[in-house]
Image (cartoon, helix red, strand yellow):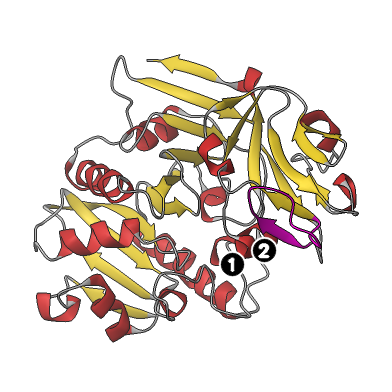
Amino acid sequence: MKKLFNPTAAELKNTPEAFLREISEAVMIFIEGESTDRTRGLVTLLHGNEPSGLLALHKWLLRAEKPLCNLICFIPSVPAAILEPMFRNRVYPGQRDMNRCFFPPYDDLPGALAEEILELFEEYKPECILDIHNTSGHSPDFGVVTYESREHEALVSLFCDRMVVTDLRLGALMERSVRRCPVVTIECGGVDDAGSAAVAWNGLQKYFYQEDVMTLEHGHHMDLYRHPVRLELKPKTVIAYADSYVIGTDITVPTTLDRCNFGTVERGQLIGWMGSRMGRDCLRAHDANGEDVFERFFELRGNQLMTAQPLKLFMITTRPDIAIGDCLLYAAEEREHQVVDT
């Protein structure tokens, strides 16, 4: 991994694309702050197709300003991002998802890089860490954390007012969160949504310059969504996106399903049209304990897959490769939604 300390404009190049092509590998960037006895951490571009955090960071770095305290930043999935078409590939072909590698074993290239990032965080001891992402479908902004705490809520509130509290464990960076160093994931919105870049930019301005980023402002409202499940496709499932069933597919998903992201859907919301492999033959939904909860969340009416109760859906993808390689969507029961007013 390449390391840059207080990089110059020449090292950064004029555009983030040119910068990534020049370095061509994962990079750590260290920026000395006005106060050198504190450090904050930042990770962006863990997925090569999610550039909002990178664009905001590069824009800020070109200003050559000093943050309030030291910053240690990581841009891991550079090789995936620079493959043509640029910012299209989530992972480098044939490799594991970087955001599934932050627990052992570290016996492949993404695992070794994740281990190195964790070791450097341990060396520099940041007081908190942000992990900046985009969703692959249209979506509002939201944060994801692994347990409820005031520190998590405060960090998410720098960017948005929605926070998902998940007990699913996938090997993500945010699962490394501890009291002495809270880690949160920020989803700035859809990768093609016009407002995503502004969400990243405005949130990072607060993170770089605000004295206290781990105390929630009095009177701030946070919408909380707890215990989501993932709707996953079983191996060899054939998926398509269209406005009606596509012959030969196991599931055809409406092209506009991502419009349901973070809206409340009632029982009977259409998720897709099933082929001859019906429902649980090609789909699964397990909770954090490994319990099969498919029928609690979804139901079949003829060949139509629908929601079985009112739900909040989020991270709905409109890309078949991501639906197959990761999941189609997340769902949380509407009764788990709470508004916290501090």
Q: Of marks 1 and 2, which one's residue comes earlier in the chain?
A: 1
Q: Amino acid at mark 2?
A: Gly
Q: Quadrant of the C terminus?
A: top left
Q: Quadrant of the N terminus?
A: bottom left
Q: Which residue is mark 1?
A: 97
Crowd band around label 1 with a 10 angstrom C-alpha radius: few (<14), some (14–19), many (20+): many
- Left or right placement of residue 110 versus residue 204 in this view: right
Q: Is residue 181 above or below residue 81?
A: above
Asked whether residue 103 is in view, the answer is: no
Which residue is more in the foreground, 292 or 174? 292
Kindly indicate whether the residue at mark 2 contacts the one at mark 1 (C-beta within 8 angstroms): yes
Q: Secondary structure at mark 2?
A: helix
Which tag is nearer the camera, tag 1 or tag 2?
Answer: 2
Q: Which residue is mark 2?
A: 325
- Magenta span dominant secondary structure: loop
Percent across and percent down for residue 314 are: 56, 39
Question: Which mark is on residue 78?
Answer: none
Which residue lies at the image location 89% right of the left edge and 48% below the top edge?
Answer: 278
Percent across and percent down for residue 172 are: 57, 55
Residue 49, located in which quarter of the rendered image?
A: bottom left
- Left or right placement of residue 44 versus residue 17 in this view: right
Residue 237, located in which quarter of the rendered image?
A: bottom right
Which residue is more in the foreground, 319 or 15? 319
Which residue lies at the image location 25% right of the left edge and 44% below the top edge?
Answer: 207
Q: Secondary structure at mark 1?
A: loop
Which residue lies at the image location 60% right of the left edge and 65% below the top edge?
Answer: 101
Instruction: Give the residues in magenta.
Output: 238-250
